[in-house]
Amino acid sequence: MSGNTIGKIFKITTFGSSHGTALGAVVDGCPAGLELSQEDIQKELDKRKPGTSKITTSRGESDQVQILSGIFEGKTDGTPIAAAVYNKDMDSSAYAALKGKPRPGHADFCWETKYGHYDYRGGGRASGRTTIGHVIGGAIAKKLIQILNIKVISHVTRIGNVKAKEVELSEIENNINENAVRCADLEAAEKMEELILDLKSKGDSVGGIVETIVLNIPAGLGEPVFDKLDADIAKVLMGIGSVKGVEIGAGFRSSSLKGSKMNDEFYIENNEIKTKTNNSGGILGGISNGMPIIARMAVKPTPSISSAQKTVDLQKDENTEIEIRGRHDPCICPRVTTVAESSIAIIIADHMIRAGFIHPNKVI
């Protein structure tokens, strides 16, 4: 199986499955000399681990990371960094009755068709739990790009029909840790949580929109034509399970704008070239222009719902009905914010090295 690695120089290969022994990542191409500890990775994993609130799955995983290689005397040594999280609270019994009966909204049928033999427990390799590898790689990427004061922030802007109002950047940074939904609009966050819990009580789920902002990015990142920065961002975000759409800047709204409204006019301030607006989302022609990068992703409702659903029995070649048991998030958006941050940080770190902003061999 291919498709488990992303990056050209700063490369992340993830491994593991929902009910397997462990999950993790191997990070290759990280320059030597970067101060890195287990705690740096753990604090990111803690933001996505299950069981942190009543709107997340009750699966009791501490997600404690163990660094296996690549660190010497508290710094990266230029060799591959391997880190793993061991599964502790698997309950595969709920999946025995689902074998050969693909769950609607899940990839069961597709994996069965393509591979024939696969780990169907908890979704196996297609589970959202595999994003542990994204977060491990992203934690290292964040630490690397922080050298140049680059920050990546993700927050929830919509859950179902509840939309957050636009707030100042400082409010986003301050408020997203104040509620379980990770929404900067605290009033909307309460309504979002109420909606999630209401649908959970009815055996249903809900999706939403997650926005990611990259600050202090230099101009000049991106490799046209096929390695455009926005193309790589779109690819890594679409690689997250349950993401069904990505937009940069004004995104789909740009289709209804006039050129006079869409175009971001340039000006000079303190000897820096900036734009008056940021409809381009910080990227023009696939290359960063120095303005904040803005990316949004549409996240579908969690496909694991407790309501009865129609499906087929592949062994008996007949129609059937299933009810999904087990522990599942009624809304993926709050926990996937950390995965979005991590994923985009990986892309930024890779392009920073490729463009020469970060030395490929050692932290200078």
Image: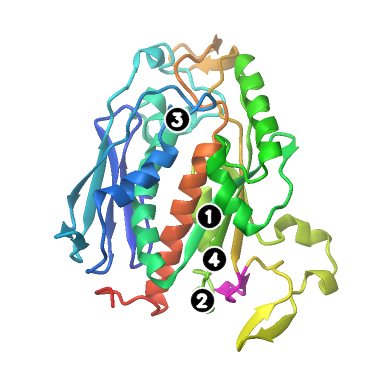
**Extreme-left residue of the structure:** 73
User: Could you tell me how far apart the alpha carbons at marks 1 and 4 are, in whole angstroms?
Assistant: 8 Å
**Label 2 belongs to which residue?**
218
Disc on res. 221: none
**Extreme-bottom residue of the structure:** 271
- In front of the other: 282 or 273: 273
- Near mark 3 (Cα within 10 A), the count class, few <14, some 14-19 or many ≥20, is some
Residue type at the position of mark 3: Thr
Image depth: mark 2 or mark 1 in front: 1
- Near mark 4 (Cα within 10 A), the count class, few <14, some 14-19 or many ≥20, is some
Label 2: element kind: loop
Image depth: mark 2 or mark 4 in front: 4
Per the rendered image, the range of residues in magenta is: 282-291
**Label 1 belongs to which residue?**
153
Where in the figure is residue 241, as x and y percent of width and height?
Answer: 49, 40
Work out whether mark 3 precedes mark 2 in sequence or the reverse, and give the earlier one.
3
